[in-house]
Amino acid sequence: MYWLLYDVCSQRRRLKMVQLCKDYGMRRIQKSCFFGIMDLARSREFGREMSQIVEEKDCVCMIPVNQSLMNQMKIWGEGQPEIAVEEELLCFI
């Protein structure tokens, strides 16, 4: 499971990055935040493709999390998605 946070300067590169995230089954949580489940091999493949898009002035951070940490997640505010992870299945309620 991974959180992906980004700040990409170019609209063109940003659109490519968003499409790549969707292609890998990641779910957009906010405009600059995605969440998805990938095994290590798939995350490395994703990283290789991402590195072809991102330039030096951009910033992309991919944060691994485990089931235990996801169970401790808190979300505040209206309109925030509730996320449940059960046996490697990601559910947005």
Image (cartoon, rainbow, N blue to C red):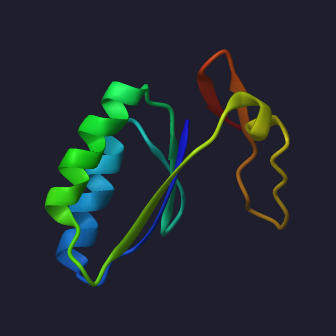
Relative to 91, is 82 above or below? below
Q: What x and y, as percent, mark residue 86?
A: 71, 20
Q: What x and y, as percent, mark residue 84?
A: 73, 33
Count the labels in the image: 0
Which part of the image, by quadrant, shows the N terminus?
Answer: top right
Q: Nearer the viewer, residue 84 or 50?
A: 50
Residue ID at (67%, 33%): 66
Which part of the image, by quadrant, shows the C terminus?
Answer: top right
Relative to 1, is 55 above or below? below
Residue ID at (34%, 48%): 21
Q: What x and y, as percent, mark residue 37?
A: 50, 32
Residue ID at (36%, 36%): 43
Residue 11 visible to an observer of this rendering: yes
Relative to 48, is 32 above or below? below
Q: Quadrant of residue 56?
A: bottom left
Q: Nearer the viewer, residue 40 or 15?
A: 40
